[in-house]
Image (cartoon, helix red, strand yellow):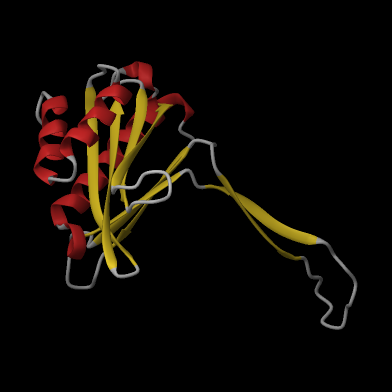
Amino acid sequence: MSIDQNTDLFEAVSRSGYYPEVVAAGLNDALAEERVVDYVLHHEPTFDRDEVRRHMTVLVLTDSRLVLVHTDEHPPDEILTKPYTSTTSEAVPVSSVKSVVVTRMVTDKSKAPVEAVMTIGWGAVSRLDLEPARCGDPDCEADHGYTGNIAGDDFTLRLSATADGGAAVQRLLAFARSLSSRTAHGASAGLR
């Protein structure tokens, strides 16, 4: 990584060609002049009926926070009569990150991961999965209530070598290592 990650980040946003001024403005506001330690950028098309819509997600790790900025493009609607973009940002103290889950997919023929999924949990969103509880008696007709689990699921990003390129997968894995290091040692340790 270069010494000036801030410059690298904004150059990557510009190279993406996806509303660079809009994305950069959202990042500038959310970063609040903090130093960028690491980042990952994901620009993805989605299919909306017969139209292609794009969106971009940028995750930034600073010395003290995890910053997420997501920009979508939208068709005209009853409120805004021209196509428009929306940018949402969230800043989470690194000390609030409870989990960093990384899944790597490797094929028989490749040594490098061909796909990676990173899920970050900080307690803002939880998923509750319930199912009817059962006992061991196959003939039992009693109501045993419900059983289930609660899983943190605040943010998930999936990148594949086929769609995004091998370098993007490696960048996601590097970002996950940086974030994991920060959560393991604490934001105040000033690690990189």
Q: Quadrant of the C terminus?
A: top left
Q: Is residue 70 above or below residue 25?
A: below
Left or right? Give the position of 175 relative to 137. Answer: left
Viewer-side residue, 47 vs 116: 47
Residue 94 lies in quadrant: top left
Q: Quadrant of residue 14?
A: top left
Residue toward you, 48 or 70? 48
Left-right relation of 104 to 136: left
Determine the image quadrant of residue 142: bottom right
Residue 131: x %, y % from top left: 71, 65
State whether residue 127 is above or below residue 36: below
Looking at the picture, tell me which residue is in the foreground, 30 or 188: 30
Residue at x 30%, y 43% (from the top left corner): 85
Q: Which residue is located at x 84 percent, y 78 percent?
A: 137
Q: Exactly how many numbered labels are in the figure?
A: 0
Q: Between residues 76 and 70, which one lies in front from this camera angle?
A: 76
Residue 135 in the image: above or below residue 152? below
- The x, y position of residue 100, in whole percent, is 41, 42
Residue 123, image x and y in percent? 54, 37
Residue 104 x %, y %:
31, 57
User: Farthest right residue?
Assistant: 142
Task: Classify residue 132 as left or right of residue 32.
Answer: right
Q: Quadrant of the N terminus?
A: top left
Q: Residue at x 34, y 31 (%)?
A: 67
Q: Residue at x 18, y 45 (%)?
A: 18
- Name the side, left or right, on which 97 lies relative to 2: right
